[in-house]
Image (cartoon, grey):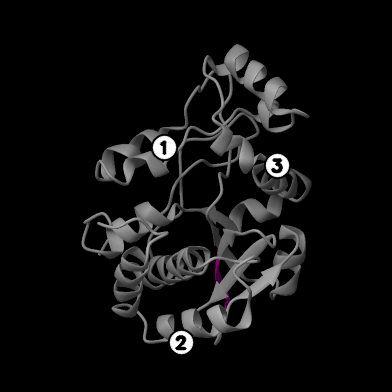
Amino acid sequence: MQKLIGIDGCKFGWVAVSMKSDTADLFKSLADLINFYPEDSMFMIDMPVGLPNVDLKERNCETIARKILSKKRKPSVFSVPCREAVYALSYEEANQVNKEKIKKGISKQSWGIVQKIREVDQLLQNNRSFVDKIKESHPEVAFHFLNSQQSMEYNKKTTEGQQERLQVLKSFSDRAEVIFNNSMSNFKRKHVSADDILDSICLAVTLEEIVNSGSSFESGNLDSLGIPMKIHYFTK
């Protein structure tokens, strides 16, 4: 049976969840993560797939996501840097390049995950077959649709927010709480936070629901390298 894996970035590197397992797994690199699972596995990741450029200054999927989310959750969707900025060597260089190419600066929040954006982009460029296997999502957008198109009320860093999200996940899978509790016990918070674990479970649930429903992953919006740009979510 095909493995369906939800992935989120974390302090250790990457956290991955299969709803067929009892716990999350941690990996230092994305390549190690992908290679750990069977060849026919599919992945849903909380990281940009496909990058903006001088002709497309903001990815359409980000614009749509902001319109979907509530006022509280809207700021979780940040503007993704262009490819040239992602490969810059410093924040100052990236900020300048991004302003030149797509007429906007880069937030420190965006720069903080540029290394992981670059890791995804390099993996897809080096092995184009992964484009069909690695799909992008955004946990707040995914939770919004799993929760009957209602955005989460509480911040995911709070106890209330984590319990709110766990309740939504439990409505789709009894295993969600088992995976969450085991992962919290198995790993240190300095390696992976509670919200990282919940986000990866959310994407695993979303991927399973999309695949089981027979929904399409197609996207007509391609970046300059032909990589599809789409934030996937499951609608009932």
Q: Is residue 171 above or below residue 207?
A: below
Give the distance between the C-alpha atoms of the residues marked 3 and 1, in whole angstroms.
Answer: 18 Å
The residue beneath circle 1 is: 62
Range covered by the magenta-colored residues: 2-6
Q: Classify residue 94 as left or right of residue 158.
A: right
Say whether residue 137 is left or right of residue 130: left
Residue 214 coordinates in the image, percent (x, y): 38, 66
Q: Residue at x 41, y 39 (%)?
A: 61
Is residue 199 visible in the rendered image? The answer is yes
Marker count (numbered): 3
Query: The C terminus appears in which quarter of the rendering?
Result: bottom left
Q: Residues within 10 Å of mark 1 (few under 14, many from 20)?
A: some
What secondary structure is found at the residue carrying circle 3?
A: helix
Work out whether mark 1 precedes mark 2 in sequence or the reverse, and give the earlier one.
1
Residue at image mark 2: 178
Percent across and percent down for residue 224 are: 62, 28
Judged by its main secondary structure, the magenta piece is strand
Task: Judge by depth and name the residue closer to the eye, 82 or 214.
Answer: 82
Look at mark 3 in the image and give the residue it sits on: 118
Residue type of the residue flagged with mark 3: Arg
Specify whether residue 1 is in view: no
In the foreground, 43 or 113: 113
User: What is the distance, in whole Å, between disc 1 and disc 2 at their CAs?
Assistant: 32 Å
